[in-house]
Image (spheres, rainbow, N blue to C red):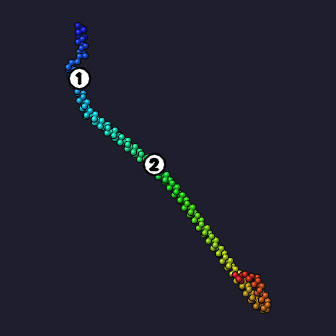
């Protein structure tokens, strides 16, 4: 009898009765509808949210790449402008140096010209002073000759002596003095 009980217990363990099959079928159908419900109301919104997030991230990455490219172009442009600005600054400095040298040369030329004018004026003034002195010497000689003539007349000299004194005086003075 023990064998019969054991066989009965064993058969129940592996025995498929109608109730078990119905429960399993209902369970499978319930799981199917539950998965469909979860898929439609839970998984699809989550999938949509993940897809939207993925699209947003992709768009931000593309925007970041475009911004990076734009920044590199702007940087290259500014570097070119900076190099150009350095070149322009050097040209401006070179132009200022050239103008300074031109001004220096002009000022030196004007100073030399002014010095030449001053020297010329001094030479002209010296020449005038020399002529004045020569004229003054002539006047003094004339005065001396007049005084001598007066003395000759006072001494009642004869004409030969007077003529001889005049000739001696003229020789002393020189012919070039009377001519200039």
Pointer 1 and pointer 2: residues touching (CB < 8 Å)?
no
Report which residue position mark 2 lands on.
Answer: 76
Q: Secondary structure at mark 1?
A: helix
Vertical relation: 117 (above or below) 81: below
Calculate the distance from the C-alpha at mark 1 to the C-alpha at mark 2: 72 Å
**Residue 128's image quarter?**
bottom right
Vertical relation: 78 (above or below) 174: above
**Mark 1 nearby-residue class (10 Å; few <14, some 14–19, many ≥20):** few
The x and y percentages for residue 52 are: 31, 39
Vertical relation: 37 (above or below) 105: above
Left or right, 171 with respect to 5, comes to: right
What's the residue at 22%, 24% (across, down)? 25
**Residue 62's image quarter?**
top left
Of callouts 1 and 2, the N-terminal one = 1
Vertical relation: 110 (above or below) 45: below
Left or right, 154 with respect to 76, comes to: right
The x and y percentages for residue 69 are: 42, 45
Report which residue position mark 1 lands on.
Answer: 24
What's the residue at 57%, 65% (across, down)? 106
């Amino acid at each position: 009898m023990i064998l019969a009980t054991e066989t009965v217990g064993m058969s129940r363990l592996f025995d498929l009765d109608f109730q078990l099959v119905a429960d399993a079928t209902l369970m499978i159908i319930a799981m199917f509808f539950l998965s469909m419900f979860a898929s439609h109301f839970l998984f699809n919104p989550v999938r949509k949210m993940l897809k939207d997030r993925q699209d947003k991230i992709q768009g931000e990455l593309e925007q970041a790449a475009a911004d990076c490219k734009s920044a590199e172009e702007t940087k290259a442009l500014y570097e070119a402008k900076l190099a150009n600005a350095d070149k322009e600054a050097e040209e401006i400095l070179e132009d200022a140096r050239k103008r300074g040298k031109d001004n220096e040369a002009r000022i030196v030329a004007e100073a030399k010209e002014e010095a030449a004018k001053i020297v010329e004026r001094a030479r002209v003034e010296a020449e005038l002073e020399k002529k004045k002195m020569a004229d003054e010497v002539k006047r003094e000689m004339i005065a001396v000759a007049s005084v001598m003539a007066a003395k000759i007349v006072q001494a009642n000299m004869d004409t030969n002596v007077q003529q001889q004194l005049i000739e001696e005086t003229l020789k002393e003075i020189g012919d070039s003095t009377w001519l200039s």
